[in-house]
Amino acid sequence: MQIRVCIGSSCHLKGSYDVIEALQAAIAQLSLRDKVELKAGFCLGQCTHGVAVQVGEQLVLGVQPQEVVELLQKYVLPEVIPPGGSKS
């Protein structure tokens, strides 16, 4: 699954690099490195609602570093782990 974090001017000023660092740590913590591709990307068209993060086809707005574990649990884990399965 691909995760794109906007690093355009507005999102950059709102802390996109802190969100990327938090996502990197959370992906490692949740053992998702082989299941998630984290990318930085320019403008996702939501400049007034940044930091914008696209998780698969889902666009999540106003993301803060302290919210990334919850974001992964809500949008990523259900997609990469089969029901009744485990992360490994």
Image (cartoon, grey):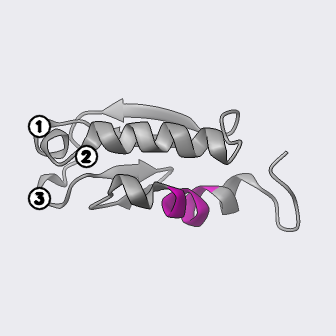
Q: Position of residue 65 (x, y in %)?
A: 37, 52
Disc nearest the viewer among 2 and 1: 1
Disc marking residue 81 = none
Q: Amino acid at mark 1?
A: Ser
Q: Residue at x 71, y 42 (%)?
A: 31
Alpha-carbon span between mark 2 and mark 1: 11 Å
Q: Main secondary structure of the magenta part?
A: helix
Q: Provide the residue designation for mark 2.
A: 44
- Asked if marks 2 and 1 touch (Cβ < 8 Å), the reply is no
Q: Is residue 61 left or right of residue 11?
A: right
User: In the image shown, does 37 or 28 lie closer to the viewer?
Assistant: 28
Q: Is residue 70 magenta?
A: yes
Q: Provide the residue designation for mark 3.
A: 48
Q: Which residues are magenta?
A: 69-76
Alpha-carbon span between mark 3 and mark 1: 11 Å
Q: Position of residue 10 (x, y in %)?
A: 11, 45
User: In the image shown, does 2 or 23 lie closer to the viewer?
Assistant: 23
Disc nearest the viewer among 3 and 2: 3
Q: Position of residue 13 (x, y in %)?
A: 13, 42
Q: Provide the residue designation for mark 1.
A: 9
Q: Amino acid at mark 2?
A: Leu
Q: Position of residue 4 (x, y in %)?
A: 40, 40
